Image (tube, rainbow, N blue to C red):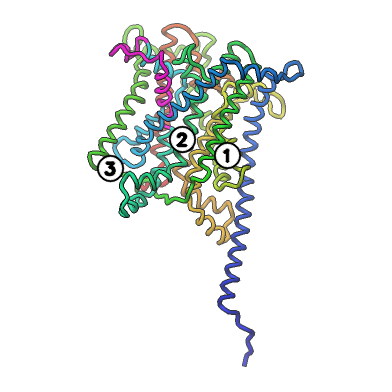
Amino acid sequence: MVLAGPVEPRENRKTAGGHRKAATADRGGRRATAFRLALMAVPLAFFAVFFAYPVAAIVTRGLRVGGRWRFGRIAEVVTDPATLDVLWFTCWQAVASTALTLAVALPGAYVFARFDFPGKGLLRAVVTVPFVLPTVVAGSAFLALLGRGGLLDGLWGVRLDTSVWAILLAHVFFNYAVVVRTVGGLWAQLDPRQEEAARVLGASRLSAWRRVTLPALAPAVAAAALMVFLFTFTSFGVIQILGGPRYATLEVAIYRETAQLLDLPTAAVLTLVQFAAVAAVLALHAWTVRRRESALRLVDPGRTARRPKGPAQWALLWGVLAVVALLIVTPLAVLVERSLNGPDGYGFTYYEALGSAADSGGTFFVAPMEAIGNSLGYAAIATVFALVVGGLAAAALTRRAGRLVRGFDALLMLPLGTSAVTVGFGFLIALDEPPLDLRASWVLVPLAQALVGVPFVVRTMLPVLRAVDHRLREAAAVLGASPWRVWREVDLPLVGRALAVAAGFAFAVSLGEFGATVFIARPDHPTLPVAIARFLGRAGQLTYGQAMALSTILMLVCAGSLLALERIRTDRSGEF
């Protein structure tokens, strides 16, 4: 007979197993926290070296004169009635532009997310084109549409260039794609059966949307609203062209003080004012959306888009198409028309003149095709930078971990609210000594472009990452998966669509970035926006026509690049 020891009760075995699982989960949680903090190191280093240091350098240069700090200048500028007027206009036009953009673009986000119709990919690329055009060029197109002798003036005698409505409409024109892609990217992945279940339980269509879909979309809507507000708050080209001497934002005021009046101390104070305003907006945004993210059921986008059914859905589709035609296509068509309307009638006179532009003097040093190659190459490199830095930052922010992480989230958005003039001058002033002597290097251009692309990558990927059910990550951690493997096998397959949308945004904003690039691009390696600005800076009908022709080329390059992205970002099943 074999004597056995005491048998452990089943309840004790269950308790011990539970303790072991809890200990494993606790270790996994600590490892995940350490992993997220490690991920923050790369974005922090990137922003410290290529954003905080250059901006601090130029602000210090403005406020420190002769070895002494001039803090009294801050009070003088801030209390100046002219500064207060500029700040008031900057704030209220940004709020009005954001509200108008959301009202116009949210129906479009729904149509692109839920409806399947011919030409959808092409139309998605078309609505993104305005976002990548240089603001000076698009402002000129709106002036030709709404100003003296423009299309509306010729047809009905209506002029809007002397009113704020031209500015607001131009801002909607630019930012329509931000809402459509940011909100629509998440909307397309929401499982419609959740809303259908609410309706089965007795909720009306409106009540089901308000209680089920709207809370799920709230983080993406808030992210889109934040980006639109920051872009309109720092609006420069649109205000410069359509606002004239009557209207000025802080960005325009900084440019005037820096480039025209050479008053660097005043420009430094205005930069600090803009910085403070943007920081307040980011703090308010973080407070309002802190508890809105929740676990959602994300599905294949190919399963959510359907052909419109019923008169209401068809009316919505045609309404959105009409808005796109009037607000997006018409200004672009005016741009093309101006490029073809030569001194001897319609033709390709201005395009033919581009061939000899490289030998016409000192304002354009390379052929247009070389400028196109420069833009595409810089934008591709900037997209890689933005995806790496922004992707790591979004992964680190997936779970909130106190004020430090929330502050890091706000820090990532600061480049959208910082004067591009300040960043460009800061690069020239700060990055001119070893070991960061990059002033003569081509890499400065994609680095400056990536600064603007990173916030779009973060704001596009973060709502989707936070919507992933955290129990999936916990289950993988309990089974022994490392944090890196959890991210690779759980998060990454679910955020493929958001990653592609983020890449498209980063590439688009890099193609059209002008404010900082104009200061740091080498004269013999200009981008298309810089080349267009050179033409616009010269008087004469020929150079204006060449600028419109080159703008049309940029528009076609952007449309082609975005259309290519639309074709490769999904396979037949809709998966990346």
Instruction: Give the percent coordinates (x, y) of residue 292.
Output: 49, 45
Report if residue 553 lies within the magenta region: no
Counting residues from the start of the chain, the first of labels 2 and 3 encountered is: 2
Residue 524, above or below 178: above
Residue 159, above or below 397: above
Read off the magenta span.
Answer: 148-177
Which residue is painted at 60% across and 47% down in the image? 401
Prevailing secondary structure of the magenta residues: helix
Counting residues from the start of the chain, the first of labels 1 and 2 encountered is: 2
Residue 292, above or below 167: below
Which residue is painted at 41% across and 24% down in the image? 555
Counting residues from the start of the chain, the first of labels 3 and 1 encountered is: 3
Residue tagged 1: 409
Instruction: Give the percent coordinates (x, y) of residue 214.
Output: 40, 43
Q: Can residue 281 be seen in this view?
A: yes
Label 3, label 1: how far apart the Cα atoms are: 38 Å
Give the position of the C terminus as an image quadrant.
top left
Considering the numbered disc 3 on the image, is that residue within a helix, a strand or a loop?
loop
| Observer-nearest of 117 and 349 | 117
Q: Which residue lies furthest to the bottom in this view?
A: 1
Residue tagged 3: 307
Residue tagged 2: 224
Instruction: Give the percent coordinates (x, y) of residue 444.
Output: 60, 27
| Observer-nearest of 370 and 54 | 54
Considering the numbered disc 1 on the image, is that residue within a helix, a strand or a loop?
helix
Q: Give residue 269's quadrant in the image.
A: top right
Query: Can you tell which of label 2 and label 3 is closer to the viewer?
Result: 2
Contact between marks 3 and 1 (CB within 8 A): the answer is no
| Observer-nearest of 386 and 107 | 107
